[in-house]
Image (spheres, rainbow, N blue to C red):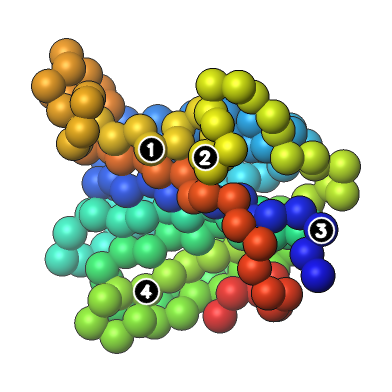
Amino acid sequence: MISQPSRQCTVELQALPSRIRQVRRIVSAQLRYWQLDPLIDQAALGVTELLTNVHRHAQPDKMCTVDIRLLLDRLTVAVHDHDPRLPTIKEADPLDMCGRGLALIEAVSESWGARAEGDAGKVIWFTLPAPSTAAPPRHPLYGATTDGPFSGASLTSGPFADSPFADGPFAGIRAVAGKREHTAARSAVVG
C-alpha cells in the first residue's frame, strides 16, 4: 500500500528560451511547495537541458509538455514533444559550446531514458531520489483536491484568458497540477 499519494504537475508550452526560464521557475516553485528543496538544482538543470533540446532539435514544432511526478521516494521529470526521433549521447570535444545536455542529465540523475510514441512523438525522462521526509503540504488556499501553487492555473483559457497576462510573458503557458490520489504500487521507472 502506498503511504503517500502521488503528486503531479504538468506544464504545456512552446519551447522558446523565455518559456524555458519560466518553466524552470515553475518547477522550482513546485518542488519548494512539495518540500523537496534539495532536488531543485538537479531538476531545474535537467528540465532546462531537455527543453533546450526541444528548442534546438524538435520538428515539426516546439510544442511540448513537462510532467513532474513524485511517487513515494522518486521524482520523475518527463518532457514529451512531437518529434519521434530519439536523442543520443554524443562525445563533445573540450571546446564545443553545446552537445553535453544528455551527459549532464545522466550525471545528475538516478536514471534517465527516452521512449518513442509513434506519430505522437517521444518522451524523455529522468528520475531523482526524493528525500523520505517530503510530507504532503497542507495549505488552506489549495483545498483537498489540488496540489501546488500552480494548480489549475491556465493563462490560455479560463479566468486568466482575458487578463493582461494573456498576451504577456506568460502567454502560451498552461500549468495544471494533478489531484492527489492513491494508486496501486508500480515501478517508479518510466519506460
Which residue in the protein does label 2 denote? 146
The quadrant the C terminus occupies is bottom right
Which numbered tag is attached to residue 152?
1
Could you give the CA–CA distance between mark 4 and mark 2, rounded to whole angstroms? 28 Å
| Residue count near mark 2 (Cα–Cα under 10 Å), binned few <14, some 14–19, many ≥20 | some
Find residue 122 and name its label: 4
Alpha carbon separation for disc pair 3 and 4: 31 Å
In the picture, the quarter occupied by the N terminus is: bottom right
Q: Are marks 1 and 2 in contact (CB under 8 Å)?
A: yes
**Where is 17 relative to 159, above or below?**
below
Q: In terms of secondary structure, where does tag 1 sit?
A: loop
3 or 4: mark nearer the eye:
3
**Along the line of sight, the residue nearer the viewer: 178 or 102:** 178
The amino acid type, in three-letter code, at marker 2 is Thr
Q: Is residue 136 visible?
A: yes
Q: Earlier in the sequence, mark 1 or mark 4?
A: 4
Q: Residue at x 46, y 79 (%)?
A: 115
Tell which of 148 and 44 is nearer to you.
Answer: 148
Cα gap from disc 1 to disc 3, whole angstroms: 25 Å
Give the structural element (helix, strand or loop) at label 2.
loop
Going from N to C along the chain, the mark reached first, 1 or 3, is: 3
Q: Nearer the viewer, residue 106 or 136?
A: 136
The outermost residue toward the top is 164
Please tell me which of labels 1 and 2 falls first in the chain. 2
Q: Is residue 107 visible?
A: no
* Residue that numbered label 3 is attached to: 3
State which tag comes first along the sequence, 2 or 3.
3
Quarter of the view holding residue 139? top right
The spot of residue 146 in percent (x, y) is 52, 39
Looking at the rendered structure, the kind of residue marked 4 is: Lys
Give the residue at x 20% y 66%: 59
